Amino acid sequence: MSPRRARAATTNNTANAPMSAAVINQLIKTRVAEALANQDIISNNSTNGDGSQNSGFGTVKFTTCTILGIALTWWNSHVKAVGLDVAYVIPWKILSNMMTAKYYPRSEIKKLEHEIWNLKVKDEVEKYMGRLPNMIQGNVMYAMPKTMQEAIELANDLMDQKVCTYAERQLENKRKQEENSRSNHNQQ
């Protein structure tokens, strides 16, 4: 006798008569057999495509119970289209890909990646500028370089200017000292 027929027979018997221990045991066996059969189906359907098991049913069911707003509307329409049993045995990787394709198109992901890259570059530029000498740092910050390369080139140009100015002053001071020394020597 199939589990469904046994359950139907037990249900009919229990509606008309008090449940005996044998009827209860049969009902339990039937339900356990159905649950195990369903679990086997779920286990066989919940692979990642590479043969590895994923958390499948539990993860998908939990995740879909937490979505809100337009994502919930999308999920409910998907469930109506494929049925609840099929929807809950979708492998996690496939559900994740479906939701990513729907709510995060490639162009949006590219924008986010670009934004993250810009934040990292900005952070690196700020760290670099923080290590510059004060007299250079203010000028570089004022120029607001967009890339690390711009910051480095600007800092190098400013450093070259400062070094040249320093060297010119040193040379001018040396020349003045020599002139003073000659004029003092000529006066004596």
Image: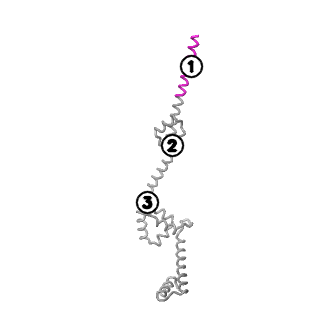
**Do the residues under discs 3 and 2 have CB atoms within 8 angstroms?**
no
* Residue placed furthest toward the top: 188
Pick whichever, 62 or 4, lies toward us.
62
User: Looking at the magenta stretch, what is its main secondary structure?
Assistant: helix
Q: Between marks 1 and 2, how big is the CA–CA gap?
A: 42 Å
Q: Which residues are magenta?
A: 165-188
Where is residue 20 shown, x and y percent of the image?
Answer: 53, 87
Q: Which numbered marker is on residue 10?
A: none
Residue type highlighted by circle 1: Gln
Q: Residue furthest front?
A: 18
Marks 1 and 3, how far apart at CA? 75 Å
Q: Which residue is mark 1?
A: 177
Residue 182 falls inside the magenta stretch: yes
Residue 7 versus residue 127 in the image, above or below:
below
Relative image position of residue 186 (x, y in whole percent):
57, 11
Q: Secondary structure at mark 3?
A: helix
Q: Earlier in the sequence, mark 3 or mark 2?
A: 3
Q: Hey, what amino acid is under mark 2?
A: Glu
Q: Residues within 10 Å of mark 3 (few under 14, many from 20)?
A: few
Mark 2 or mark 1, which is nearer the start of the sequence?
A: 2
Disc 2 is placed on an element classified as: helix
Residue occupying image coordinates x 51% and y 48%: 120
Image quarter for residue 131?
A: top right
Which residue is under mark 3? 103
Q: Which quadrant is the C terminus positioned in?
A: top right
Where's residue 17, x and y in %? 49, 89
Give the labeled residue for mark 2: 126
